[in-house]
Image (cartoon, helix red, strand yellow):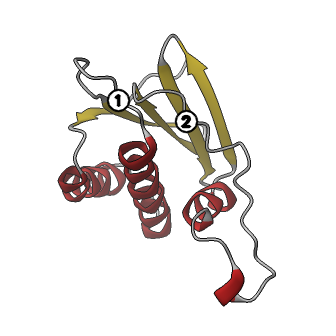
Amino acid sequence: MITSDFHVQVAARVSELRDLAAMVETFGETHDLPHRTIFIINLALDELVTNTLVHGSFQEGIEPKIVIDLSIRENRVRVVVESNGGRFDPTEDTEPDLTSELETRAIGGLGIHLVKTQADKFSYEFDNGINRLTLEYNLT
C-alpha cells in the first residue's frame, strides 16, 4: 500500500497555488527529485487545481475541499488530487485540436493535454462525491 509522504488541503482559491508550488518544491528537494519532475508536478497541479476551481460545481453550504497527496515509491512519484466540486472528468473528450490553424482552434484543452502527455499514468475516478485524479511519473 502507498502511504503519503506529503498531504495538504488547499483552500479553493487561486491565490493558494503559489504556496502549494513552494510546498511541492520543498518536498521535491527533500527527496532529491529531478528539477524537471518538480516543475512538471507543479505545472500539473496548477492546471488541475485551476480547472477544479473554474469547472467545479461546488454545492452551496458545503465547504469546497481540494486535497493533494504526493508519494514516492519504487522510483515513481504518485500525485493524487481530490476535490468535492461535483463530477468533472478531464479524461473525457479532452483531446484538443493540434492540427488546425491557431486562429480556428477552439479555446481550451491544451493544459489537460499537457498534463496527460507528461504523466506516465493519468486516471480519474468519481467516488462518493469525490473527484480523484491520479498521476504517476517514472523517476528512471
Q: How far across and down, in percent of the image, does residue 15 sit? A: 18, 55
Helix, strand, or loop for circle 2?
loop
> Residue 18's spot in the image, x, y percent?
21, 59
For image coordinates 35% across by 29% down, the residue present is 58
- Residue shown at the point (55%, 35%) measured from the top left: 88
Task: Pick the residue in front: 53 or 123.
Answer: 53
User: Taking 130 as reference, is 61 left or right?
Assistant: left
Horizontally, residue 86 falls left or right of residue 93, namely left
Look at the image and tell me in which quarter the N terminus lies: top right
The vertical placement of 93 against 67, above or below, is below
- Judging by the rendered image, the residue that carries numbered circle 2 is 88
Query: What SS does tag 1 mark?
Result: loop
Compared with 69, 91 (above or below) is below
Horizontal and vertical percent position of residue 45: 42, 52
Residue drawn at (41%, 33%), measured in percent from left and top? Answer: 57
Corner quadrant of residue 76? top right
Q: Split into 4 quadrants, where in the image is the C terminus? A: bottom right
Q: Nearer the viewer, residue 65 or 24?
A: 65
Mark 1, residue position:
58
> Which numbered disc covers residue 101?
none
Residue 75 visible (yes or no): no
Type of amino acid under label 1: Phe
Amino acid bearing label 2: Phe
Q: Is residue 12 visible?
A: yes
